[in-house]
Image (cartoon, rainbow, N blue to C red):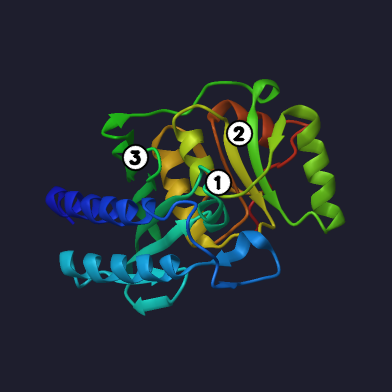
């Protein structure tokens, strides 16, 4: 895609957000994916996903599309990965923090992403090896160390091992609740908090991929837990600033040590 096409994509996402904004705090859930209130689905989740699929297809019909609500519409090695409303539960209640998220995936690599905070009209964008921006202005992660860090953590705390890791983190930084995902990545990318960590998380790749590229392009480190590499399909990850990453992964007190690769 060229720059003019990316501009068209931004326009589509902006329009989708403005449509949603009218219903902020004024919409009911039509169903729930699980027994948790956070897993609500409204008619606007579905309508927004269909709108994005149709409009993005007009820009470049060769690019596939996979969304949270309807799955894969067009299969391709190059496709849009979309969460039409991240934080639907907040959207229903009229609470800030919900966003539109999408990432362009090409041959299993994240190429371009958008997180649109349509309530505050903040458009976060990232492009591989081109940096990250907020409303067109460059943004960068913080340089705070772990002892001063605020970090969002998502994990299935019903499992003893996860509770143990969570407890270790809670002793060395300020651990924040994990819902929803997109705005936390955005806050990390602009240096307001120090990261987002997922180990055995509830979310899916559409919840994480757009923000993972944003944090990386804002100067952060994004890696799968236990490795120095990154695959967006592996949902266990660190997306943090460099100082925090070093402390969490290196040394005898590392909570997430990097394991040697086995042949």
* First in residue order: circle 3 vs circle 1: 3
Residue, disc 3: 121
Which residue: 79% across, 44% down?
165
Q: In the image, is residue 7 above or below residue 201?
A: above
In this picture, residue 151 sits left or right of residue 28: right
Query: Is 171 situated left or right of 65 in this image?
Result: right
- Earlier residue among tags 1 and 2: 1
Quick one: SS at disc 2?
Answer: helix
Residue at x 26% of width, y 54% of height? 15
> What residue occupies the far front of the structure in this picture?
26
Which residue appears at 68% of the width and 34% of the height? 248
Considering the numbered disc 1 on the image, is that residue within a helix, a strand or a loop?
strand
- Asked if the residue under mark 2 is in contact with the one under mark 1, i.e. CB atoms within 8 Å, the reply is yes
Pick whichever of labels 3 and 2 is earlier in the sequence: 3
170 shown above or below 144 = below
Q: Position of residue 26 (x, y in %)?
A: 47, 56
In this view of the protein, which residue sits in the foreground, 67 or 161? Answer: 67
Rendered location of residue 185, percent (x, y): 50, 42
Q: Is 243 located above or below residue 78 in the figure? A: above
Q: Residue at x 37, y 46 (%)?
A: 116
Q: Name the element at disc 3.
A: loop
Sort mark 2 into few (<14), some (14-19) or many (20+) by Cα contacts within 10 Å.
many
The residue that mark 1 highlights is 223
Kindly report the distance in space between the C-alpha atoms of the residues bearing marks 3 and 1.
29 Å
Which image quarter: residue 50?
bottom left
Q: What whole-number distance in Å separates the C-alpha atoms at marks 3 and 2?
A: 30 Å
Q: Name the residue under label 2.
A: 245
């Amino acid at each position: 895609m060229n720059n003019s096409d990316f501009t068209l994509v931004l326009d589509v996402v902006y329009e989708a957000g403005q449509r949603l904004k009218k219903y902020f705090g004024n919409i009911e859930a039509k169903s729930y994916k699980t027994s948790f209130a956070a897993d609500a689905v409204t008619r606007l989740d579905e309508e927004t996903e269909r709108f994005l699929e149709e409009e993005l297809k007009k820009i470049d019909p060769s690019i596939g599309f996979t969304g949270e609500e309807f799955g894969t519409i067009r299969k391709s090695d190059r496709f849009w990965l979309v969460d039409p409303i991240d934080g639907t539960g907040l959207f229903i209640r009229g609470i800030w923090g919900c966003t539109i998220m999408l990432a362009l995936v090409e041959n299993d690599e994240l190429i371009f992403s958008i997180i649109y905070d349509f309530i505050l009209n903040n458009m976060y964008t990232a492009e591989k090896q081109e940096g990250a921006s907020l409303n067109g202005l460059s943004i960068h992660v913080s340089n705070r160390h772990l002892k001063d860090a605020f970090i969002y953590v998502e994990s299935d705390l019903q499992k003893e091992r996860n509770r143990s890791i969570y407890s270790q983190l809670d002793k060395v930084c300020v651990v924040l609740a994990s819902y929803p995902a997109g705005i936390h990545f955005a806050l990390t990318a602009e240096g307001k908090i120090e990261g987002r960590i997922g180990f055995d998380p509830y979310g899916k790749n559409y919840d994480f991929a757009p923000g993972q590229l944003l944090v990386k392009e804002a100067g952060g480190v994004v890696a799968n837990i236990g490795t120095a590499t990154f695959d967006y399909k592996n949902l266990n990850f660190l997306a943090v600033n460099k100082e925090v990453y070093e402390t969490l992964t290196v040394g005898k007190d590392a909570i997430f040590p990097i394991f040697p690769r086995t042949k």
